[in-house]
Amino acid sequence: MRRLLTAAVLGLALLGTAQAAIDTYEFATEAERQRYRNLVQELRCPKCQNQNIADSDAPIAMDLRAQIFRMLEEGQSNQQIIDYLVSRYGDFVLYKPPVTARTLLLWYGPAGLLIGGFALLGVILLRRRGKSGGVANGLSADEQQRLATLLSQRPANQPPVDKKD
């Protein structure tokens, strides 16, 4: 009896994953099927953000797959379908948005931040190098003379002072 109950619970748990929607569309030619596959793989799901329309199980992705199939059946070109989806959902549905005034930051922002980071690092290193090249440890000439006098007077059994500070 216990095994039967365990099998029933396991079967119900697996039933949820077995209900994933599978689109079955009938295409007139194999070329049309390939166009459909290419389109749904190169367009991003508006809800999932990191999945294309083909891999997403979101309701909007299912609707978009049906819309793309309908538009292919109407004889629209790939560019017309892409233009329709971009006009409706914006450049976000494209994995490679075009370089326009609105997307310049998206395309060149990371490179700009990297260059700016290296420039800031260079400035910091030059300032540190400039400070250490001047008066030793920030001491005036009188202070350096006094320090030299004190160091020369130390007892012979005392180890030398480390000057790395």
Image (tube, rainbow, N blue to C red):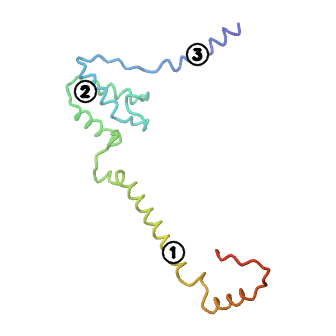
| Residue 54 horizontal/vertical position (percent) | 37, 28
Work out whether residue 87 or residue 124 is closer to the camera in this orientation and state it: 124
Q: Amino acid at mark 2?
A: Met
Q: Where in the figure is residue 144, as x and y percent of width and height?
A: 63, 88
Q: Position of residue 27 (x, y in %)?
A: 26, 18
Of the numbered discs 1 and 2, the one sitting upstream in the chain is 2
**Which of the 4 image quarters holds residue 49?**
top left
Which image quarter is the C terminus in? Answer: bottom right
Q: Which residue is mark 2?
A: 71
- Pointer 1 local density, CA inside 10 Å: few below 14, some 14–19, many at least 20: few
Tell me which label, 1 or 3, sits earlier in the chain.
Answer: 3
Residue at the outermost top position:
1
For numbered disc 3, what is the local secondary structure?
helix
Element carrying mark 2 = helix
Q: Which residue is mark 3?
A: 12
Spatial CA distance of label 1 from label 3 is 69 Å
Say whether residue 54 is left or right of residue 123. Answer: left
Q: Nearer the viewer, residue 19 or 116?
A: 116
How far apart in space, not on screen, are marks 1 and 2 (Cα)?
65 Å
What's the mark number on residue 129? 1
Q: Residue at 24% across / 25% down in the picture?
A: 72
Q: Residue at x 29, y 39 (%)?
A: 86
